[in-house]
């Protein structure tokens, strides 16, 4: 029997993608298990998600660790303690330290609510992404799952879903339309990465 790949989720907000990843991991076809949730926000909704599923929640930020080196060391330690093999960013607004990106290169995923490489980069998060898509007049938006590199939203794209932008839609409506596609795509891609890691 194949041991499930041990996943840590990093999240800063509501945690709906974290919830979707955890729920998928309870299915028979899942090849991963979420063993840890890390947040830079101690009051984020994702904390309740962690509690509901009985998954350890750790708050790590410049508040808990004002010294950047101490912060990286704490992050590394917690990942090692939980024997984390894959990291899934799910609405994580803090940049992953370069040292951690190097140690886990090719094993950190992110989900972005638009068609990268457009509408990515610093400041492109949450509703700002959808506002930019509407401003651009692009006929399509979508969801991208990509590998994480040192800069925001720059790593290779692993999978995308393309969604038509309806006329006269608000950014909030667009965000609500895109979100269920995120919940569907992200667990599938994470599971595929777990399969590659286990070579099964
Ligand atoms: C999602 O739209 C995700 O694509 C983006 O941030 C949002 C997080 O939402 N990176 P949630 O916290 O998973 O509900």
Image (cartoon, rainbow, N blue to C red):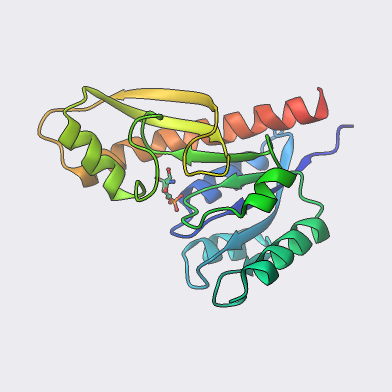
Q: Position of residue 32 (x, y in %)?
A: 72, 39
Q: Position of residue 4 (x, y in %)?
A: 79, 39
Q: Is residue 13 left or right of residue 71?
A: left
Q: Which of the pair 162/80 is nearer the observer? A: 80
Q: Is residue 7 above or below residue 93?
A: above
Q: Residue at x 44, y 59 (%)?
A: 13
Which quarter of the rendering shows the N terminus?
A: top right
Q: Residue at x 48, y 72 (%)?
A: 43
Q: Residue at x 27, y 48 (%)?
A: 128
Q: Is residue 36 left or right of residue 82?
A: left
Which quarter of the rendering shows the C terminus?
A: top right
Q: Residue at x 45, y 24 (%)?
A: 160
Q: Is residue 96 above or below residue 176?
A: below
Q: Which of the pair 70/8 is nearer the observer? A: 70
Q: Is residue 5 above or below residue 198?
A: below
Q: Is residue 117 left or right of residue 48?
A: left
Q: Position of residue 87 (x, y in %)?
A: 66, 46
Which of the 4 image quarters holds residue 130?
top left
Q: Is residue 86 left or right of residue 166?
A: right
Q: Position of residue 113 (x, y in %)?
A: 38, 38
């Amino acid at each position: 029997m194949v041991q499930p790949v041990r996943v840590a989720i990093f999240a800063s907000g509501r945690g709906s993608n974290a919830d979707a990843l955890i729920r998928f991991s309870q299915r028979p076809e899942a090849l991963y298990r979420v063993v840890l949730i890390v947040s830079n926000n101690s009051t984020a909704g994702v904390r309740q998600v962690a509690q509901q599923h009985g998954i350890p929640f750790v708050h790590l930020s410049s508040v808990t660790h004002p010294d950047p080196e101490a912060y990286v060391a704490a992050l590394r330690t917690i990942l090692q303690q939980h024997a984390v093999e894959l990291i899934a960013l799910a609405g994580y607004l803090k940049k992953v330290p370069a040292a951690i990106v190097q140690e886990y290169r090719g094993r950190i995923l992110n989900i972005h609510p638009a068609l990268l490489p457009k509408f990515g980069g610093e400041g492109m998060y949450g509703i700002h992404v959808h506002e930019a898509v509407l401003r651009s007049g692009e006929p399509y938006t979508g969801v991208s799952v990509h590998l994480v590199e040192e800069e925001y939203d720059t790593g290779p794209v692993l999978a995308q879903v393309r969604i038509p932008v309806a006329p006269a839609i608000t950014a909030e409506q667009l965000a609500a339309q895109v979100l269920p596609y995120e919940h569907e795509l992200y667990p599938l891609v994470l599971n595929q990465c777990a399969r590659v890691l286990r070579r099964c």
